[in-house]
Amino acid sequence: MLDTSPRDKNRDYIQEYLTEIKRYQKAIDRVPDQMRVKLIELKSKQLYFIGELAAEFAGQYKEIYAARKQIYNEAYLEAEKYKQQKAELAVIELRKTEADYFRSWKRWQNATETVREEINSLKYRVRQDIADGNRQG
């Protein structure tokens, strides 16, 4: 398979993104609720890494999907009889791995939406504070 991505195969992007997400979460936890503008800033930066993590899981899910299809077809063509059954047996573990990555992708995709909604809620509250003359944010 032709790899055209500039990504470093030796880097653990998932761990890097998780580390950044946790780092930002610690900073978010230290900020008082009244400092909404700071919370928006930190959550926005965290959102970037959550999105990257979701994308990483999506990409790996698709890579596993492609590998599963390839192995299935190779096993199907090699088998003399019971072709479909032998091909299915050849990809059992890949199906489980594929499901794990799909689950993680959806989890982080949902987290992206949740944080985006939190940011929008904070922005709305900041606008309300400004309209009320309260500029603590």
Image (cartoon, rainbow, N blue to C red):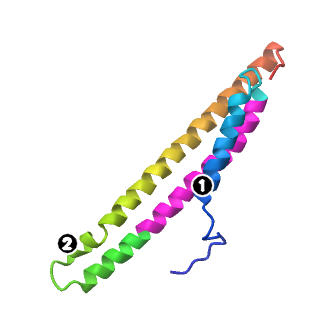
Query: Which stretch appears magenta?
Result: 38-65
Q: Which mark is residue 15?
A: 1
Apparent side of residue 76 relative to residue 68 in the rendered image (left or right) = left
Q: Residues within 10 Å of mark 1 (few under 14, many from 20)?
A: few
Given residues 39 and 8, the one toward you in this image is: 8
- Taking the image as shown, residue 12 lies to the left or right of residue 133, namely left
Is 109 above or below relative to 101? Answer: above
Q: Position of residue 85 (x, y in %)?
A: 19, 72
Could you tell me the amino acid type at mark 2?
A: Gln
State whether residue 33 is above or below residue 17: above
Q: Is residue 132 above or below residue 116?
A: above
Residues at marks 2 and 1 touching, judged by CB atoms closer than 8 Å: no
Residue at 18% over, 86% down:
80
Which one is nearer the viewer's eye here, 26 or 133? 26
Would you identify the image quadrant in which residue 36 lies? top right
Provide residue 130's location: percent of width, then percent of height: 81, 20
Q: Main secondary structure of the magenta part?
A: helix
User: As shown in the figure, which amino acid type bears the numbered disc 1?
Assistant: Gln
Q: Is residue 81 above or below residue 7?
A: below
Is 55 in the magenta? yes
Foreground label between 2 and 1? 1
Q: What mark, if any, has residue 85 been given in the picture?
A: 2
What element does badge 2 sit on? helix
Q: Quadrant of residue 87?
A: bottom left
Answer whether residue 3 is magenta in the image. Answer: no
Q: Quadrant of the C terminus?
A: top right
Of mark 2 and mark 1, the one earlier in the sequence is 1
Callout 1: SS:
helix
Can you give x and y, in whole percent of width and height, for residue 35 in the image?
A: 77, 24
